[in-house]
């Protein structure tokens, strides 16, 4: 019979609220290939996420000690995890009586100041902090944002609220290089005159008047994008309201 490892591991998913496992060390339980971070990032290929549900919390403890640790995903932290302490008495109660609610689990993070939420095991793990994301082009910034939005959408509302409670309110500023097209001003003017104040997508009046020149606000969109080889011509352009313009770029066909 396989001898259990000394680190006990309980994963709280949206469906399976108390999945049991064990690990050889705290490091493996937190940042290993089957640890909490890999679980939250959907990198543990042994887990059927559709069956277990979205991972929301992980509780780990070492047999024989009187306190354990509860973690939740938090990409603002150096190891991608938000940490708090939990007593073995509480863990034993959950083991005996069944898994707690998200509200109960979140309360462990609320008991300590935000500035003290950093991992109590950081020195023990002796791993360097992750290199901050450093984009080189504007598209890198957008791609990273979309990735993080997808990550956020997989979280429960309770976990997302917990992350917001400790998030840095002022965003980090970065410098990037980008390419731009020098567009033909005559094309823009002709297309706007042709539209005569009505969106050429939905045929509704422009949503407001520009304060700069008191003309109807419409945006000139290229039917074949310049980035895809389209020409900067009147025939390849339409005047759109902001809603129709965003739909042309991001809407489902």
Image (cartoon, rainbow, N blue to C red):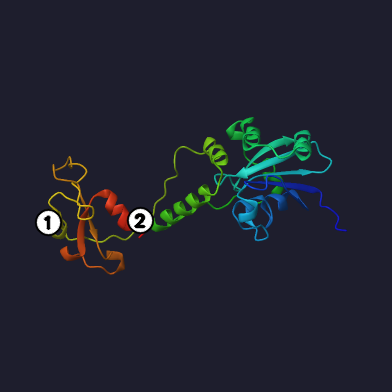
Question: Residue 51: image x %, image y %?
Answer: 64, 54
Residue corresponding to mark 1: 194
Kindly identify the residue that appears in the image at 45 percent across and 51 percent down.
Answer: 145
Q: Give SS at disc 1.
A: helix
Tell me if residue 213 comes above or below residue 237 in the rendering: above
Kindly identify the residue that appears in the image at 20 percent across and 55 percent down.
Answer: 200
Tell me if residue 11 comes above or below residue 188 in the rendering: above
Tell me if residue 160 comes above or below residue 34 in the rendering: above
Task: Please tell me how crowded label 1 is: few (under 14), some (14-19), or many (20+) other residues with Cα within 10 Å.
Answer: some
In the rendered view of the protein, which quadrant contains the C terminus? bottom left
In the rendered view of the protein, which quadrant contains the N terminus? bottom right
Kindly identify the residue that appears in the image at 64 percent across and 30 percent down.
Answer: 111
For the question of whether residue 9 can be seen, the reply is yes
Q: Earlier in the sequence, mark 2 or mark 1?
A: 1
- Judged left or right of residue 2, residue 245 is left
Question: Residue 80: image x %, image y %?
Answer: 59, 48
Query: Residue reaching furthest right?
Result: 1
Residue corresponding to mark 2: 251
Tell me if residue 86 comes above or below residue 36 in the rendering: above
């Amino acid at each position: 019979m396989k001898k259990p490892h000394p680190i006990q591991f309980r994963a709280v998913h949206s469906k399976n609220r108390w999945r049991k496992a064990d690990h050889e060390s705290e490091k493996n339980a937190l940042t290993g290939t089957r640890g909490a971070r890999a679980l939250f990032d959907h990198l543990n290929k042994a887990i059927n996420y559709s069956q277990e549900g979205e991972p929301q919390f992980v509780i780990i403890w070492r047999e024989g000690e009187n306190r354990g640790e509860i973690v939740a995903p938090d990409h603002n932290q150096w190891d991608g995890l938000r940490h708090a302490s939990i007593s073995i008495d509480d863990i034993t109660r959950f083991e005996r009586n069944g898994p707690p609610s998200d509200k109960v689990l979140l309360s462990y993070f609320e008991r300590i100041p935000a500035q003290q939420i950093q991992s109590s095991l950081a020195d023990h793990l002796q791993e360097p902090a992750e290199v901050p994301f450093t984009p080189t082009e504007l598209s890198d910034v957008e791609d990273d944002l979309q990735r993080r939005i997808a990550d956020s959408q997989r979280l429960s509302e309770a976990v997302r609220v917990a992350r917001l409670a400790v998030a840095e309110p002022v965003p980090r500023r970065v410098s990037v290089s980008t390419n731009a097209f020098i567009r033909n001003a005559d094309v823009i003017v002709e297309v706007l005159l042709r539209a005569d104040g009505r969106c050429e997508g939905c045929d509704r009046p422009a949503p407001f008047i520009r304060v700069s020149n008191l003309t109807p606000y419409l945006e000139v969109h290229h039917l074949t994008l310049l980035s895809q080889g389209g020409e900067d011509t009147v025939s390849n352009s339409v005047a759109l309201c902001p809603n129709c313009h965003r739909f042309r770029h991001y809407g489902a066909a």
